[in-house]
Amino acid sequence: MAEVLGKRNFDDATVDNNNVLTTASNINDLNNVSGTPSTDDVLTWNGSGWAPSATGDSTFGSEFQQASSDSQSTTTSTSFVQKLRLTTGTLPSGTYRIGWTYEYAHKSTSYDFRGQVQINDTTTIHNIRDESQDSGTDQRKPCAGFYYHTGSGVLNIDIDYCRSSSSGGTSYIWNARLEIWRVS
């Protein structure tokens, strides 16, 4: 008998160069399979016998959607301006990871860049206020994060930005990304 991949014993087993079982005869204990496998199921050893099981949980990573905007945008508004919106399809009930990233700058030595990420224009999941102390735009700062949201339905997820004062320079934003995927 040969031991294949350190798991179970087989008579006359052949394993290819990628450690894939290509042929086997007389697989021990296979006569005692409990249940009938469905399409794409695999046989797994449960400690006392072989049983069919799904190839894995397909929830994690499902429902993946993303949006991006790499171009530079600017504003002198003191009210939030939308840089990027991701509108999802109808999501089934579950827990989702929402991720974001962007780069920003503010051309002012006294006033602030403000940024936020919102769900459905009502729930703020990220808020930043930064006084850059720089009058140029060569000082790009990265901003990234994630949030877990439990729910279902269509979501509108936004990255918004503005400046803090009407006399306070110009706010810049680049390389904005939003993504969502189901975790449970």
Image: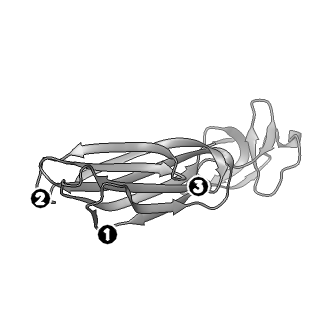
The picture places residue 20, in percent across and down from the top left corner, at: 61, 54
Circles 3 and 1, Cβ within 8 Å, touching? The answer is no
Q: Residue at x 29, y 43 (%)?
A: 129
The local secondary structure at tag 3 comes to: loop
The answer to whether 126 appears left or right of 120 in the picture is left
Q: Is residue 182 above or below residue 171?
A: above
Circles 2 and 1, Cβ within 8 Å, touching? The answer is no
Instruction: Give the residue type at disc 3.
Output: Leu
Sequence-first disc among 2 and 1: 1
Sequence-first disc among 3 and 1: 1
Look at the image and tell me whether residue 33 can be seen: yes
Look at the image and tell me whether residue 56 can be seen: no
- Which residue, given by chain and number where applicable, does mark 3 sit on? 155
C-alpha distance separating marks 2 and 1 = 18 Å
Instruction: Give the residue type at disc 2.
Output: Gly
- Which residue, given by chain and number where applicable, does mark 1 sit on? 71
Instruction: Give the residue type at disc 1.
Output: Ser
- Which residue, given by chain and number where applicable, does mark 2 sit on? 136
C-alpha distance separating marks 3 and 1 = 24 Å
The local secondary structure at tag 2 comes to: loop
The answer to whether 168 appears left or right of 29 in the picture is left
Location of residue 63 (image quadrant):
bottom right
Q: Residues within 10 Å of mark 1 (few under 14, many from 20)?
A: few
Q: Residues within 10 Å of mark 3 (few under 14, many from 20)?
A: some
